[in-house]
Image (cartoon, helix red, strand yellow):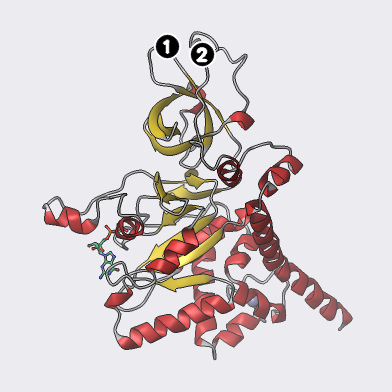
Amino acid sequence: MDRDRLGKDGQVERYLKGAERERTRRQNEKNRNLRGGEREDREHRGHRTRGHEQWDEEDDDAPTFQRIRKPTSAPTGRRAGLPEADEADCLVVGVESGKVLVELHGEVVEARMLPEFVVRGAVTVGDLVALEETRGGSPRVIAIAPRRNALTRTDPANPHEERVIAANLDLAVIVLAPHEGGVREGMADRIRVALAPHGVEDLLVVNKVDLLADGERTALEARIAAHAENGREAIAVSAHSGEGVDQLRSALADRTVVFVGPSGVGKSTLLNLLDPSVQRPTGEVREKDGKGRHTTTSSRLVRLAGGTRLIDTPGVRQFGLGPLDLDDLRVAFPELVVRATDCRYSDCRHLGEEGCALEAAAKSDVHLAERLGAWRRILESDG
Ligand code: GDP
Ligand code: ZN
């Protein structure tokens, strides 16, 4: 009996660990957003990177990313005298084959990479880099600052390879749209799992709510309320009617934000609406000129009014996760964590083990059953 109870206590502790880690991460993230907080935090961890917030606060009026280094030598690949990664302060706004687009004096310039950086994922949108002038050619990226976080997924063609989508984020906006009246949230769960180790906040945007019938709308509201109960922020938006757009805009203010989701959900339309001075081609525009659906083939960072740095990403069909850490999965499923304390085994994965409390409870709780199904789909495909 006693052993049982001890077992249970241990179980509670294990399961709560995930939620606790998440709280700590979110708190750290908030602290970092306070003036100077990030620097302190990084110094504590042995880095001395300057974060966007700090830049923006210190250099309110100045063009922010502006340094190009004098040539240190002919481009012979000699490393002596190169700036350290912690001096990297030019913002990467795009990456194309073999070259990066970097903000310099408020303008976007093309830079080349040192051969050692020409590796997929070595430089990504949102990175801070140091540039060096080269004689007669475009500047070169010679140092990359350590990232404070990154959103990554596995390469659909090669699940062992990681693809970095964007780095140094304050918020990930997961954009979905209703499909046959309901919203499939599997991708949102996966993105939350990918963000969990970094503690990056997420916001679920359900766009195209103008397409929902009354009953479907009521069901969506119930889901949004359930999300809120579990600490997940979600909003109903329509780029067509304008509903929720102001709320979305204010959630993005002064932050580096990535828009991620399947294609066709309205990411470009929303972006154009958030700041009409940025015009990304949308599905509709391309359909009109007969060229079919557009494809945003690479991520781009654009600055919007209100201090938002928005990273628009190509639509993802599948969001593959690397090796799964159960604690990261728990962060995305807090409603299961609380109920799992009654499972017989402390390491219950809720995949049909004997004495699984979730399995029993799900029989009479539709919402729980649905979340358990989502948990299982991730564990069964990636675990
Ligand atoms: P993206 O691939 O996520 O960037 O999607 P797009 O912005 O290209 O939009 C895809 C299609 O959805 C276009 O035809 C848009 O006009 C349409 N669309 C975008 N937002 C809404 C919306 O709120 N309601 C409706 N009904 N259609 C929308
Ligand atoms: Zn269980």
Q: Residue at x 59, y 34 (%)?
A: 145
Marks counted in the figure total 2
Q: Is the C-beta separation of discs 2 and 1 under 8 Å?
A: yes
Q: Which mark is residue 71?
A: 2
Quarter of the image where the N terminus is located: bottom right
Q: Which residue lies most toward the bottom here?
A: 364
Q: Residue at x 60, y 86 (%)?
A: 360
Residue 282, by quadrant, is bottom left
Quarter of the image where the C terminus is located: bottom right
Q: Nearer the viewer, residue 221 or 160?
A: 221
Q: Position of residue 143 (x, y in %)?
A: 56, 27
**Type of the residue with mark 2:** Pro
- Distance from disc 2 to disc 1, alpha carbons, whole Å, reads 8 Å
**Mark 2 surroundings within 10 Å by alpha-carbon count, few (fewer than 14), some (14 through 19), many (20 or more):** some
Quick check: 352 above or below 327? below
Q: Which mark is residue 135?
A: 1
In the structure shown, which secondary structural element does the residue marked by tag 1 occupy?
A: loop
Q: From this viewpoint, is residue 381 visible?
A: no
Q: From this viewpoint, is residue 279 visible?
A: yes
